[in-house]
Amino acid sequence: MEVSIDVLSVHFDAEIWGPIDPNSFNPSRFSGDIKRNPAAFLSFGIGPRSCIGMKFALIELKLALVNLIQKYQIFPGTGFPDELDFIEGGFFCFKN
């Protein structure tokens, strides 16, 4: 018997990703303060039969980033601070 999971229903479930609307961008939802089931975000699946392309996709992402850094010069925008204050343990590692 084949069993499949409706991933979109899990990714946009208000009970899992609430109390803020799951359709809105909220980076603090990944801060680690709220404990969620590890299967709540199924980008590559979970368990021993997860996506075999996961490691390949992560390597491709790193190679694409290296190519961008090699080909282009990156400069800070106007009003950007000279130094960033880092916060450990968060999804994003810097504060405004």
Image: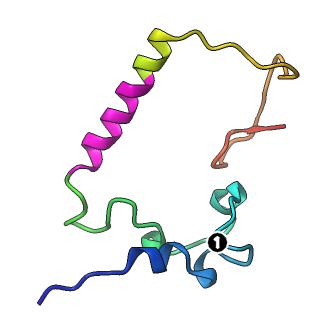
Q: Position of residue 24 (x, y in %)?
A: 69, 64
In-front residue for pair 93/63: 63
SS at mark 1 in the image: loop
Within 10 Å of the Cα at label 1, are there few (<14), some (14-19), or many (20+) other Cα atoms?
Answer: some
Q: Is residue 51 left or right of residue 2?
A: right
Q: Along the horizontal axis of the image, is 31 left or right of 7? A: right
Residue 21 location in percent, x, y? Answer: 70, 74
Q: Nearer the viewer, residue 38 or 20?
A: 20
Quarter residue 8 falls in: bottom left
Give the residue drawn at x 15%, y 85%: 2
Vertical order, 47 against 62 (above or below): below
Looking at the rendered image, the quarter that the N terminus falls into is bottom left
Q: Main secondary structure of the magenta part?
A: helix
Which residue occupies 60% across, 71% down? 35
From the image, which quarter does the C terminus lie in? top right
Residue 68 lies left or right of residue 60; in this view the side is right
At label 1, which amino acid type do we have? Pro
- The picture quadrant where one finds residue 5 is bottom left
Can you identify the residue that label 1 sits on? 22
- Residue 56, position in %: x, y? 25, 41
Query: How many dots with numbers?
Result: 1
User: In the visual, does 61 lie left or right of 86?
Assistant: left
The verdict on residue 87 being magenta is no
Magenta segment: 53-65
- Residue 2 against residue 65 in the figure, above or below: below
